[in-house]
């Protein structure tokens, strides 16, 4: 992996709304390499016919514990 980042693809709809692409299993698509993400964005942008645009969104790779405040520890069962 390149550093501690993963890459999502953001789709901007013709009406201005933005969504993240999913992996086909209702999970946000996470790509480990910028070159793979950019190639996918290039293909999507070249083939769009609905006024949508796509771009790579770098995201810091986080674990579930990174999402919680230290004052509120995770409860392990």
Image: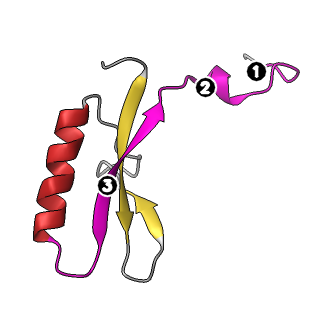
Q: Is there a contact, CB below 8 Å, between mark 3 and mark 2?
A: no
What residue is rendered at 30% in x and 18% in y?
Answer: 1
Alpha-carbon span between mark 1 and mark 3: 34 Å
Per the rendered image, the range of residues in magenta is 48-73
Residue under label 2: 64
Query: Closer to us: mark 3 or mark 2?
Result: 3
Against 44, residue 25 (above or below) is above
Residue under label 1: 74
Label whose residue precedes the other's in the sequence (2 or 1): 2
Question: Would residue 3 be found to the left or right of residue 43 on screen?
Answer: right
Horizontal and vertical percent position of residue 19:
44, 62
- Judged from the image, the secondary structure of the residue bearing numbered disc 1 is loop
Label whose residue precedes the other's in the sequence (1 or 3): 3
Horizontal and vertical percent position of residue 31:
29, 35
What residue is rendered at 17% in x and 37% in y?
Answer: 36
Nearer the observer, 12 or 68: 12
Residue under label 3: 55
Nearer the observer, 64 or 4: 4
Q: Dot 2, how many residues are within 10 Å of its Cα: few (below 14), some (14-19), or many (20+)?
A: few
Nearer the observer, 42 or 31: 42
Q: Is there a contact, CB below 8 Å, between mark 2 and mark 1?
A: yes
In this picture the colour scheme is secondary structure
Query: Closer to us: mark 1 or mark 3?
Result: 3
């Amino acid at each position: 992996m390149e550093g501690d980042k993963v890459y999502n693809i953001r789709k901007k709809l013709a009406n201005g709304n933005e969504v993240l692409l999913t992996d086909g299993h209702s999970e946000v698509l996470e790509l480990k390499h910028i070159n793979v993400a950019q190639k996918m964005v290039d293909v999507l942008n070249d083939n769009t016919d609905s006024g949508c645009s796509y771009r790579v969104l770098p995201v810091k790779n986080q674990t579930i514990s990174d999402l919680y405040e230290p004052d509120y520890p995770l409860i392990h069962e």
